[in-house]
Image (spheres, rainbow, N blue to C red):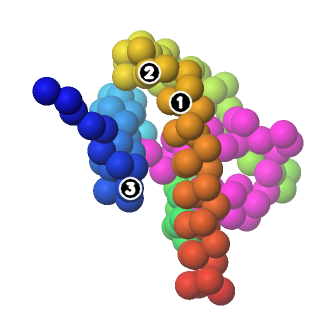
Amino acid sequence: MTTTAPAADARNLALAHYAARGVLEHILDRHGVTFQQQVALRTAVTADAPLTPDALADRVGGYLKADPADIRVTLDELLTRELLAEDGPHLRPTDAGRELLAAVAAETAPISARIWDGIPAADLAAAGRVLAHVNARADAELAALTG
């Protein structure tokens, strides 16, 4: 019996996204952090330079396709929990914020390794190229709808 792989389409992409996100959210729940808070905190940690609240909200909103005003609420939550701190006009991650991300990464690393284990490099490269095209095209379509 021969089985064929399902064609890549929006449904399969969504199913893979939500399956992986479900794993991450399970771990985030242990730390009392939401997915959106984790994305915002990771964005602050990985930024080349400290960002203003508006710049951070815009960047995270762009990643999540979310209203920057909603992201500002998330940033306020991170400030209240002292995972981000104000530094003049900028926000910077605190040691506690960095430690939280490190703990989440340590917990997700072995699970991620099992999820990705055995997938041939050529398949990952092809999937990466397809996902980059889908992302660019979806961003263009969203811009046309909202512009």
Q: Name the residue under label 3.
A: 9
Q: Is mark 3 on a helix, strand or loop?
A: loop
44 in magenta: yes
> Can residue 17 be seen?
yes
Magenta segment range? 34-63
> Can residue 40 be seen?
no
- Camera-nearest residue between 45 and 8: 8
Amino acid identity at mark 2: Ile
Give the crowd class for mark 3: few <14, some 14-19, many >=20 residues within 10 Å. Answer: few
Q: What element carries label 2?
A: loop
Q: Quick one: label 1 or label 2, which is nearer the N terminus?
A: 2
In the image, residue 46 sits, relative to residue 113, either above or below, namely below
Quadrant of residue 45 in the image? top right
Q: Mark 1 points at which residue?
A: 124
Label ID, residue 119:
2
Residue 54, x across and y down, in percent:
73, 64
- Camera-nearest residue between 24 and 17: 17
Amino acid identity at mark 3: Asp
In the image, residue 51 sits, relative to residue 25, either above or below, namely below
Quadrant of residue 31 in the image? top left
Residue 2, x across and y down, in percent:
20, 29
Check contact, mark 1 vs mark 2: CB within 8 A.
Answer: yes
Q: Quick one: label 3 or label 1, which is nearer the N terminus?
A: 3
Amino acid identity at mark 1: Leu
Name the residue: 82% across, 45% down: 50
